[in-house]
């Protein structure tokens, strides 16, 4: 599989659901987060919140995500890619 545009594996509804989960866990409004805003630096997320996001995504998207992927899940764009890769592997 090519690494070109892996997020195309997610439709708009999935991206919206992921964004809602992230915003809920980070306790921010959806208009405060962009695909490239950093969870830790821009939204004061700590490692516990990152793990909460990972667990919620596994539950709602029916995927398994290794904790090692947390390093790539620093913003929405990274989360979309990790979820798309996990979904493609399942």
Image (cartoon, helix red, strand yellow):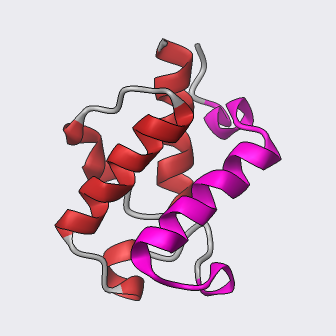
Where does the magenta region start and end? 4-32
Q: Position of residue 73 (x, y in %)?
A: 38, 54
Give the image quarter of residue 87.
Answer: top right
Give the image quarter of residue 50.
Answer: bottom left
72 or 24: nearer the eye?
Answer: 24
Q: Position of residue 20 (x, y in %)?
A: 61, 64
Residue at the spot 19% in from the left edge and 66% down from the top edge: 47
Q: Answer above or below: position of 55 versus 89.
A: below
Residue at the spot 53% in from the left edge and 72% down from the top edge: 23
Residue 13 falls within the magenta-colored stretch: yes
Q: Answer above or below: position of 36 versus 55.
A: below
Count the labels in the image. 0
Q: Position of residue 32 (x, y in %)?
A: 60, 87
- Report the magenta stretch's main SS: helix
Report the side of 38 relative to 60 (left or right): left
Please identify the quadrant where the N terminus is shown.
top right
Residue at the spot 59% in from the left edge and 53% down from the top edge: 18
Residue 14 falls within the magenta-colored stretch: yes
7 or 86: nearer the eye?
Answer: 86
Q: Answer above or below: position of 36 versus 7.
A: below
Q: Answer above or below: position of 67 versus 50.
A: above
Q: Position of residue 53 (x, y in %)?
A: 38, 56
Give the image quarter of residue 68.
Answer: top left
Report the side of 43 relative to 20 (left or right): left
Residue at the spot 31% in from the left edge and 57% down from the top edge: 52
């Amino acid at each position: 599989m090519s690494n070109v545009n892996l997020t195309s594996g997610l439709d708009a509804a999935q991206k919206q659901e992921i964004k809602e989960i992230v915003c809920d866990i980070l306790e921010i409004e959806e208009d405060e987060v962009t695909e490239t805003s950093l969870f830790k630096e821009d939204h004061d997320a700590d490692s516990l919140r990152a793990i909460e996001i990972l667990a919620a995504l596994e539950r709602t998207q029916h995927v398994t995500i290794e904790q090692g992927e947390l390093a790539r899940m620093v913003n929405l764009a990274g989360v979309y890619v990790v979820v798309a890769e996990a979904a493609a592997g399942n």
